Image (tube, rainbow, N blue to C red):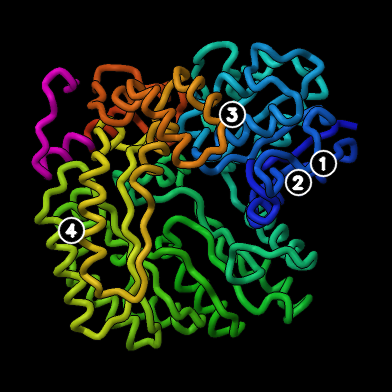
Amino acid sequence: MIRVAIAYPSTARIALQSLSIHIIRKILGEYSNVYTDFVFMGNDGRSITKQLRDFDIVIFSVHYELDYPRILKMMEVSGINPFGFQRTANDPLIVMGGPTLMANPEPMSSFADIILIGDAEVLIPTLIDYYMEYGKNIEEYANLVGFYVPSLGKHTVTKAFVRDLSYSIKLVHDTAIELSYGGAKSLFNNLAVLEVMRGCPRSCLFCMEGFVSRPVRFADVTAIKDLILRDVNRDRKLVNGVTLVGLSVTDHPGFKELMNFLVNDLGLSVSSPSLRVDSLDRDAIRLIAGGGQKVLTIAPESSERLRRALGKGFSDDDIARVAMDAIDAGINHLKLYFMVGLPGEIYDDINSITNLLLRLRRLGIKFSLSVNPWVPKPHTPLQWLPMAGDDVINDRVKALREIHTYTGFSTYSAFDAKVQALLSLGDRDISDLIFEASLTSLDRGSWRRLLRKYEGLLSRYVYSWKSLNSELPWSHIRIPGIDEGNLKSMLLRYVKEVGIDLPTQHIG
């Protein structure tokens, strides 16, 4: 038997709500010679639920940069040296994957034997199949598509991806259904989960997930219908609602057909994620409302001026129209997402957002507000630009908080955003920072002390203009559908439109 730990760097309460670890376990469950178990952090933050040393392979599912030090904590508690070059053949094979590491694996390269770049449905079976042949001879894995072996130095890795979503939509849906049979709580509103697409055709300049999840693939509507019909007929009480998953589900060419089938033909409730204003006409909104959704989530992001430059070409008038159509259709609340500290942002942009919020209030529209810092991310056109300082971010969050037009307000800490940016943009030279962080309680005080010690890394990666002529830490990671030359062209159009003067030494 090959013993595989599926590790998540958080407590069981949080980890078990992540569909990804259950999907990995379901994939591994197809192998009769593989034994799997979950390993999580204890509630005290200093222990783990099982010893990682008892496994042959440890797969870390990673979704959030600030969890990187917790991965090292889990290894240390098990008596495993976090640094890969100090481990031996007696230690488990340490494998990591997830969207943040797919975008930039370098911050964790000193600690992983293998980092998986791509879709789990392709990579996990390949890992098991070749483990039977290669074992812990990690250099052998470097020739496999989507396998990054950091100990060999930086080498070009191309993302491995599922071309046809037929298997994937069934895998995701069946995993969610089985969880509900087992009584597990999910982050999703409904028990049935339908992944209708991967990737995003929109190319919003700030959105890492939209770029690294390429190429764009749409699930076949007929296959989705057959899948939901199977379970509705099997247990109507179980499948009384559906959650649609995708970065921009209304861009699916069969969105209205699918919604009409789910809502009008089957009478199911339907929950949709954040939706693009420019893809919402009155018919689409009525279908969404017909599915029982009472809150419509949209992301204006910024002022009309910056929104246009970012790739969201809808106006304040469009937002007001969608809001009124939503109210008319029976949706009684909006959730609005904005970013502050964007490159080229001036105070007129904050005033423009204020005017939009006041306009919505005058129209009698209730909304909650989420205002968060822009964080530069790999594989996006804005990756070459510096992040705004804490003072700028905090000042602009405060300005929008003080409008008091909202029913609820949330924000992401400027300090946490700064740490996230460093862990997202850094090269291998931030490994000592991550290691030292793993030895602390990971509270704000600990991070502040570390950032003072490693202030030079913040200057190098977070607050710097990156040269268009230089290699970036993640330039060796190739995502199909992303060409660095195109990203540069998009950047140059953006800076021209918003009035940023690039330092001449940084222009390619």
Indicate which disc, 4 or 3, sits on the residue closer to the N terminus.
Answer: 4
Q: Is residue 279 visible?
A: no
Say which quarter of the image contains residue 193: bottom right
Instruction: Report the Cα–Cα distance between label 4 and label 1.
Output: 49 Å
Query: Residue at position x 28%, y 28% from top?
Result: 485
Q: Nearer the viewer, mark 4 or mark 2?
A: 4
Indicate which disc, 4 or 2, sits on the residue closer to the N terminus.
Answer: 2
Instruction: Report the Cα–Cα distance between label 4 and label 2.
Output: 44 Å
Q: Amino acid at mark 1?
A: Thr
Tell me if label 2 and label 3 are in contact, CB under 8 Å. no
Query: Residue at position x 61%, y 76% from top?
Result: 241
Indicate which disc, 1 or 2, sits on the residue closer to the N terminus.
Answer: 2
> Residue under circle 1?
36
Q: Amino acid at mark 3?
A: Leu
Query: Residue at position x 33%, y 46% from top?
Result: 414
Indicate which disc, 3 or 1, sits on the residue closer to the N terminus.
Answer: 1
> Residue under circle 3?
439
Q: Secondary structure at mark 4?
A: loop
Instruction: Report the Cα–Cα distance between label 4 and label 3.
Output: 42 Å
> Where does the image place residue 126, in percent across and percent down from the top left?
71, 31
Query: Residue at position x 51%, y 34% from top?
Result: 102
- Along the line of sight, the residue nearer the viewer: 309 or 489: 309
What is the span of residues highlighted in magenta in the rendered image? Answer: 491-508
Instruction: Report the Cα–Cα distance between label 1 and label 2.
Output: 7 Å
Q: Is residue 289 visible?
A: yes
> Where does the image place residue 71, in percent across and percent down from the top left?
62, 34
Residue 25's disc number: 2
Q: Secondary structure at mark 2?
A: helix
Query: Which class describes the residues within 10 Å of circle 2: few (<14), some (14-19), or many (20+)?
Result: some
